[in-house]
Image (spheres, grey):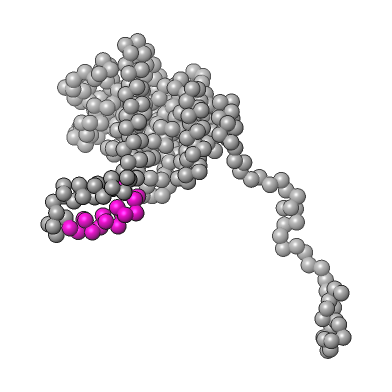
C-alpha cells in the first residue's frame, strides 16, 4: 500500500496522493560523465610524461609535492623511471628581491628563448610560502605571455615543508619536466638569502637581477650571493633610470673583480637591460649561451652537475635522519624536559644532546 496511514487503523487521517516534486538535485548530473581524477600507475605516469603530456606531468608533480606516504611512494618510482630521459636541458636560476622585475623579465626571457625553439618550464622556490600558506612565485598570472604559450609549463613553488624539503621537490620536478621534453628550465626565487643556495644547487647558470639604487646597492647584497652569480643583470635601465643603472653596473663590475675567479673559470658578467621595454634581452641570452658552450668545453658543466648530485644525496640523508630523530615519539616527549634541564643548568647543551642521541640509538636497536 502506497500510504499505510490510509489503513482503517488510522482513523481520522487521510493522506492524499500529493503532487510530484521536482528533483532537488540536478537530474542531468546523473547522466554526466564523471570526471574523477584518474590515478595512473607509475608506468602510466612515465609513459604520459615521456610523450610530453602536460596534464599527466602536472598530476605527477602534484604527487611529488604531496606529503602522503602513498603518493610519495608512487612519485619516487615515477622519478626513478624518468631519470634515464632527463638531464638534457639547460637549467637557469633567476633571483632578485621582490619588485626587481622577475616576472616581467621571465616573461620576456622565456619568449626570447622559445623563439629559438624547444620547450620551457618555469619552476620556483619560495621560502615565504611556508608562512603565507600559498605561493606567489611562479603564479601564472604574473607571466602573461608565457602562461598562454603552448610550449611553456609554469608551476608555482611547492608550499609545504622546510626550505630544504621545498627545494628537493623542485629538484625532483626538474627531472620530470626534462623527461617530458622541456629542455629549458628556469628556477625562480626571491633574493632573501638561503633560497639562493638551494637554487644554486640545482642550476647550471645563476642569474641575479638587481636594481640601481642610490649608489650603495652593493651594501645590501650579501657577499655569498654575489659569489654565486654567473651574471648580474641590472633591470629597469630605461627612461630617466639609464644613467643610474649604468653606474650601478660599473660598481658591480668593480666589485666582482675583487673576488677570485670562480672554479668554472668564467668571470661573472654584468649587463643592464629593461624587461619592461624588452631592451638588452638578446645580449643577456647570447652571454648565457656562451657560458654554456664555455663550461661544456672545459668540463665544468658536467662537474657542477655531479657535485649537485652528491649534494642532493647528502641533503636527502640529512633530512631523513633529522625527521627520523625528531618525529620519534619518545624523543619528542624527552625534548621539552631536556631543554628545560639545559636552561636550569642541570646539563650542558652538549651532554644533553649526547643523552638524547644515545636514547635514540638505543631505541633503534
Ligand atoms: P618581481 O616582484 O621581481 O616579480 O617584479 P615584477 O616583474 O612584478 O615587477 C615589479 C614592478 O616593476 C612592476 O610594476 C613592473 O611593471 C616594474 N618593472 C619591471 N621591469 C621593469 C623595467 O624594465 N622597467 C621599468 N621601468 N619597470 C619595470
The residue nearer to you, when weighing 234 against 82, is 82
- Seen from the viewer's position, the closer of residues 194 and 236 is 194
Furthest residue toward bottom: 12
Can residue 287 be seen by looking at this rendering?
Answer: no
Q: Nearer the viewer, residue 12 or 364?
A: 364
User: Which corner quadrant holds the C terminus?
Assistant: top left
**Vertical position of residue 14 compared to residue 98: above or below:** below
Residue 279 drawn above or below residue 147: above
Q: Position of residue 2 (x, y in %)?
A: 85, 73
Residue at 16%, 55% in the rendered image: 342
Residue in the image at 35% along x and 31% along y = 313
Predominant SS of the magenta segment: helix
Q: Nearer the viewer, residue 64 or 330?
A: 330
Residue 251 visible in the snapshot: yes
Residue 79 is a magenta residue: no
Q: Which residues are magenta?
A: 325-341
**Res 347 quadrant in image:** bottom left
Q: Is residue 264 above or below residue 365?
A: above
On the image, the x and y values in percent for residue 87 come to: 44, 22
| Quadrant of the frame with the N terminus | bottom right
Amino acid at each position: 500500500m502506497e500510504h499505510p496511514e490510509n489503513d482503517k487503523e488510522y482513523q481520522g487521517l487521510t493522506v492524499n496522493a500529493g503532487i510530484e516534486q521536482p528533483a532537488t538535485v540536478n537530474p542531468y548530473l546523473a547522466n554526466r560523465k564523471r570526471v574523477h581524477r584518474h590515478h595512473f600507475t607509475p608506468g602510466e605516469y612515465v609513459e604520459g610524461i615521456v610523450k610530453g603530456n602536460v596534464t599527466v606531468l602536472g598530476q605527477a608533480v602534484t604527487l611529488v609535492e604531496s606529503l602522503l606516504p602513498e603518493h610519495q611512494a608512487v612519485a619516487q618510482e615515477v622519478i626513478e623511471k624518468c631519470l634515464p630521459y632527463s638531464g638534457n636541458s639547460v637549467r637557469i636560476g633567476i633571483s632578485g628581491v621582490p619588485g626587481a622585475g622577475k616576472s616581467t623579465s621571465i616573461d620576456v626571457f622565456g619568449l626570447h628563448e622559445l623563439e629559438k625553439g624547444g620547450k620551457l618550464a618555469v619552476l620556483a622556490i619560495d621560502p615565504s610560502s611556508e608562512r603565507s600558506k600559498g605561493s606567489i612565485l611562479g603564479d601564472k598570472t604574473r607571466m602573461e605571455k608565457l602562461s598562454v604559450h603552448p610550449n611553456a609549463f609554469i608551476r608555482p613553488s611547492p608550499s609545504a615543508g622546510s626550505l630544504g624539503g621545498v627545494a628537493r621537490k623542485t629538484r625532483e620536478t626538474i627531472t620530470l619536466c626534462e623527461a617530458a621534453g622541456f629542455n629549458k628550465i628556469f628556477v625562480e626565487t626571491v633574493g632573501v638569502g638561503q633560497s639562493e643556495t638551494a637554487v644554486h644547487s640545482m642550476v647550471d647558470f645563476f642569474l641575479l637581477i638587481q636594481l640601481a639604487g642610490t649608489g650603495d646597492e652593493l651594501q645590501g647584497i650579501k657577499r655569498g650571493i654575489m659569489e654565486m652569480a654567473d651574471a648580474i643583470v641590472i633591470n629597469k635601465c630605461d627612461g630617466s633610470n639609464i644613467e643610474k643603472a649604468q653606474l650601478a653596473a660599473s660598481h658591480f663590475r668593480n666589485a666582482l673583480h675583487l673576488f677570485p675567479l670562480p672554479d668554472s673559470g668564467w668571470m661573472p658578467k654584468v649587463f643592464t637591460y629593461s624587461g619592461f621595454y624588452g631592451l638588452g634581452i638578446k645580449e643577456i641570452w647570447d652571454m648565457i649561451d656562451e657560458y654554456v658552450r664555455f663550461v661544456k668545453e672545459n668540463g665544468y658543466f658536467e662537474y657542477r652537475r655531479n657535485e649537485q648530485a652528491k649534494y642532493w644525496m647528502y641533503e636527502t640523508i640529512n633530512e631523513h635522519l633529522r625527521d627520523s630523530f625528531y618525529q620519534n615519539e619518545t624523543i619528542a616527549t624527552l625534548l621539552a624536559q631536556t631543554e628545560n634541564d639545559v636552561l636550569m643548568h642541570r646539563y650542558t647543551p652538549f651532554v644533553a644532546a649526547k643523552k638524547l642521541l644515545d636514547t635514540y640509538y638505543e631505541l633503534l636497536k
